[in-house]
Amino acid sequence: MTRTAFRYFALAALMLTAMGGNNHPAWAQAGAKWKPGAESIIVSAKPSGNWRIALSGSHLGSAILVSASIPVPYSDLNLTKEPDAAELGRRIHVAARLVCQELDIKYPPNLFPIVEGYSGYECERAAAGDGMSRADMIIADARR
């Protein structure tokens, strides 16, 4: 190997090492205090019955199905303990409020009248109820 080729290989190896060192995932996570895992419950705003109508200038419209969902992680909780199970319930209720607010922001009921489904408090109650039924099964399984 010639001296020039050796220098190019050495320079390439040095650059690859420098680029790989700056992008190391452990360095990026060193300051993270909370690391969500794969365990999560999906809270959804009832996509099967959330029909809204898109009105046009002629007041004739077509119904569209809208939905939103958000994952609620729980891998950091010990669900055998009551305070952690209560925290999961709190997270689910907050997620239900957020997911219904997202639908009302993206599809305001005054512009997209609701044909079938829920808005406001009813949406939150239905989304939280769905999420809590899943959480109850997971908590019961953890306590066995």
Image (cartoon, rainbow, N blue to C red):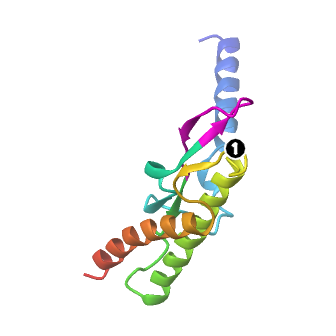
Q: Position of residue 109 (x, y in %)?
A: 68, 52
Residue position for label 1: 22
Residue at 45% in and 70% down:
129
Q: Position of residue 137 (x, y in %)?
A: 32, 72
Residue stretch rendered in magenta on the structure: 53-68
Q: Is residue 54 found inside the magenta-colored segment of the image? A: yes
Asked if residue 16 can be seen in this view, the reply is yes
Q: Secondary structure at mark 1?
A: helix
Out of 13 and 103, give the one closest to the viewer.
103
Quadrant where the image shows the N terminus: top right
Which quarter of the picture shows residue 133?
bottom left
Residue at 43% in and 72% down:
132
In the rendered structure, the answer to whether residue 133 lies left or right of residue 57 reads left
Out of 28 and 86, give the one closest to the viewer.
86
User: Residue type at mark 1?
Assistant: Asn
Q: Position of residue 19 (x, y in %)?
A: 68, 36
Asked if residue 34 can be seen in this view, the reply is no
Q: In the rendered view, tell whether residue 84 sits above or below residue 21.
A: below
In the rendered structure, the answer to whether residue 24 lies left or right of residue 74 reads right
Q: Is residue 66 found inside the magenta-colored segment of the image? A: yes
Residue at 47% in and 55% down:
46
